[in-house]
């Protein structure tokens, strides 16, 4: 009986040691994973995306969808131009149909300021052919699809 108790104690000690090792390994992996994630987020979040749309719900959707980037919002073309003067974005997503200054006029002014910044048109009214004619760098039809947004943004930013 005594041998059995000694063996049981030794086995419990081995289990406790393995448990401590497993806990240490998990902590090390978590630390390494966190460092890698922070590094990757730092790479992508270095990009600034300007979302220009007069519809707050569209802006809100895009801000949430593009959370891995620094996203700046503008409710119209004039506000977008003010923002660009202070902080030039790496990408602009611009609605076509907006009051005061539509997306086509905004594109012209953006090209004067920085001809290299990619500008993607957003519209439920204009066609892809219309935006190609005006030389936008991409097109997002409304209603906006999350997967299309992500592909278009990643494609546009990869050209930077």
Image (spheres, rainbow, N blue to C red):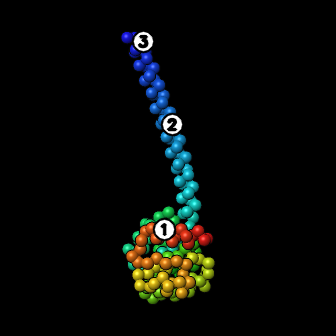
**Of marks 1 and 2, which one's residue comes earlier in the chain?**
2
Q: Quadrant of the C terminus?
A: bottom right
Relative to the observer, which residue lies in front, 131 or 34? Answer: 131
The answer for how far apart the CA atoms under marks 3 and 2 are is 32 Å
Viewer-nearest of labels 1 and 2?
A: 1
Viewer-nearest of labels 3 and 2?
A: 3
Tell whether label 2 touches label 3 (CB within 8 Å).
no
Where residue 139 sits: x, y (%)? Answer: 49, 78
Label 3: element kind? helix
Which residue is most to the top?
2
Where residue 50 sits: x, y (%)? Answer: 51, 74
**Of marks 3 and 2, which one's residue comes earlier in the chain?**
3
**Of marks 1 and 3, which one's residue comes earlier in the chain?**
3
The answer for how far apart the CA atoms under marks 1 and 2 are is 37 Å
- Which numbered marker is on residue 97? none
Label 2: element kind? helix
Where residue 42 sits: x, y (%)? Answer: 56, 59
- At a point 43% along the width and 15% down the height, the residue shown is 6
Q: Quadrant of the N terminus?
A: top left
Q: Which residue is under mark 2?
A: 24
Label 1: element kind? helix
Q: Which residue is under mark 1?
A: 150
- At a point 51% along the width and 38% down the height, the residue shown is 25
- Which numbered marker is on residue 3? 3
The answer for how far apart the CA atoms under marks 1 and 3 are is 65 Å
The answer to whether 110 appears left or right of 7 in the picture is: right
Q: Residues within 10 Å of mark 2 (few under 14, many from 20)?
A: few
């Amino acid at each position: 009986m005594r041998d059995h108790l000694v063996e049981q104690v030794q086995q419990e000690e081995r289990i406790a040691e393995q448990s401590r090792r497993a806990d240490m390994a998990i902590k090390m992996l978590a630390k390494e994973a966190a460092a890698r994630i922070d590094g990757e987020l730092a790479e992508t979040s270095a990009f600034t995306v300007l979302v220009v749309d007069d519809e707050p719900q569209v802006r809100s959707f895009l801000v949430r969808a593009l959370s891995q980037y620094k996203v700046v919002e503008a409710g119209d073309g004039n506000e977008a131009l003010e923002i660009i003067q202070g902080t030039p974005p790496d990408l602009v997503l611009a609605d076509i149909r907006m009051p005061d200054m539509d997306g086509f006029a905004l594109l012209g002014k953006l090209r004067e300021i920085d001809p290299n910044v990619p500008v993607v048109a957003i519209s439920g009214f204009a066609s892809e052919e219309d935006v190609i004619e005006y030389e936008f760098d991409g097109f997002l039809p409304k209603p906006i699809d999350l997967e299309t947004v992500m592909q278009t943004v990643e494609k546009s930013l990869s050209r930077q």
